[in-house]
Image (spheres, coloured by chain):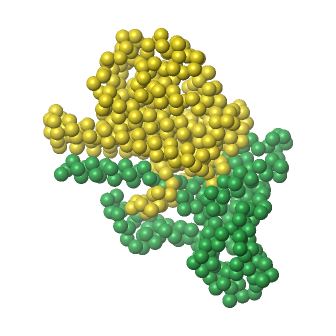
Amino acid sequence: MKRATALIGALLLTPGTAFAGPSPFGIATPDGGGALSWAGPFRGFFVWIAAEQSSFYRELTGALSELSQSSHAAWFLIGLSFAYGVFHAVGPGHGKAVIASYLLATGDTLKRGIAISFASGFVQGLTAIIVVGIGTILLKVTAVTMTRATDALEIASYAMIALCGVWLLWSKTVGRHDHGSGTSAATAPHVHDAFCAIHGHNRLGLDRRSLGQQGLAVTPTRFGAAALGQPRLAYGGFSATAATASVDLSCDCGHAHIPDPATLTSPLTLRSGIAAILAVGIRPCSGAVIVLVFALAQQLWWAGILSVLAMSLGTGATVAALAILAVKAKDIAVRFTGDGRSALANRVLRGFELAAAAGILLFGLAMLGGALASG
Amino acid sequence: MLNRRLLLAFALLSAGMATASAHPHVFVDAREEIVFDATGKMTAIRHSWQFDEAFTAFAVQGLDANGDGKLSDDELQPLAKVNVDSLKEYRYFTNLKVGDKHVPVNFPSEYWLDFHGGRLTLFYTLPIRTPIAPGPHATLEVFDPEYFVAFSFVKNHEITLNGAPAGCKATVRPPHELDDATMAQLAAIPADQHDLPQELADAASSLSTLITIGCS
């Protein structure tokens, strides 16, 4: 939390980290996807979704502006926000594809899948609240600066998604027989933390806050080194420490390659899925940011926060629905190929996992490329 | 093969989800004006785009630099510049055609923002690169095909022809609203049906307002 706050604060303060995003008015970037869908076979469906969202969003902002006159409007607002979240998440972004593919690739249980889906929605809402809170109350930045910060977070999100894909592919292919051969098991209980590389840093005794101030520019390199499973991290002045510390810096993207005691005793712990959750949730959606600023402008910060949290719940519900669908589809496919132990079943399962991991990588790269190219 | 079908179904589902459409976060009430010269040629398009309250609140965040509670022209002008600079890449969401030919425009010759009653309005003028007479059939569309910006037009002020010769007339065809019946029909279409019935496809494709200008 502190680390996220420091990172976002640094983003908002540093004009140098600006990545100009594609945005018609230069402020508030559209959430991924875009024109593609309008030519596709599902065009009619998405036109309908867009129309529904549009009306919920308008009612939502309308309810916000009337809130100061009527306290009953609060529940109405929360209901609308939830409904908006449900419809909103059917659109692009929100990592539905990423979360679903992640669940396929890791073979996580349905229960965990649902928890991860809701957590990703919640983190996304939280990011919006942090960005707007720091941006408007503490730093009083303009919409242009806030948009740059969210654009940078978006790029970080895509980079993390791509790296998740790289790691999953790695662990499913080359790295799958290396389990337990590293030094990490011997040196420390392998705790699966959020940002793999950052967690590496933390083990090296680096102050969390200073990471934020170093900004995003160094993040890809750190992840780059970490994701390839290099056992040591040569980074700036810390390389000497890293060399002696001998820790496993691999970004496991939440896939527990060594059973973590914490995971075993408490199967619902989100820790091992945190990398995926953060990769998706670190990017706030424009709708939440706009609604929050609008609420703040009317001194209705509590209503804004409640609204965004309700939106997150709605988003989580949609993502969870897709996650359930994905996991069920895999289960059925595997069940039809044998009792779960046959060679064919294993091949099908592995096929699913590899395809899902490759999908995450390609999605991350495509979105990253698109975001950087338009910058 | 059941597996293959399942895989295919899942792949289709993922593809559909991954390319889902954008959604509107900016609502614009637009007024349009076309400026004519003495010879009856169109020389410029003037946009007046009023933003919704929520987007306005976001846009003006932190702009009151001197903290006097008001937004002066000096405080708004940098944002107006950002707006028109960014709009260039979107071709200003403006598509003027004479006959079937697209009419190119230049970078805005003037632009400013006005903040009034909690809403921001962007005014800007797009000079037409080579002034051209509308002839019997010219069309103006202001539309975001990605639907991040939802344009609607101020009733009875959709279009003004400024200095047009007598005999020129503008008409407005409103977008085909998606009525509840159409929406229900769209929702009922199974995901594996790829061809929309023609009338549904038409209903979904004509969501923009079309302004027609004709001179006799």
| Chain A, chosen colour in render | yellow
Viewer-nearest residue: B102 or A243: A243
Q: Residue at x 74, y 62 (%)?
A: B108
Viewer-nearest residue: A89 or A106: A106
Residue B110 vertical placement versus A136 (above, below):
below
Residue A331 vertical placement versus A212 (above, below):
below
Residue A326 on image: x %, y % = 32, 43
Q: Is A99 on the left-hand or right-hand side of B45?
A: left
Q: Is residue A295 among the parts visible in the rendering? A: no
Viewer-nearest residue: A217 or A309: A217
Q: Residue at x 55, y 44 (%)?
A: A372
The N terminus of chain A - image quarter: top right
Residue A320 on image: x %, y % = 39, 41
Q: Is A344 on the left-hand or right-hand side of A62?
A: left
Residue A351 vertical placement versus B51 (above, below):
above
Residue B139: name its quadrant: bottom right
Residue B5 vertical placement versus A244 (above, below):
below
Residue B187 on image: x %, y % = 40, 60
Q: Is residue B176 among the parts visible in the rendering? A: yes
Viewer-nearest residue: A51 or A326: A326
Residue A6: name its quadrant: top right
Count of all numbered marks drawn on residues in the image: 0
| Chain B, chosen colour in render | green
Residue A356: name its quadrant: top left
Residue A156 on image: x %, y % = 53, 36
Q: Residue at x 31, y 49 (%)?
A: B10
Q: Residue at x 45, y 41 (%)?
A: A364
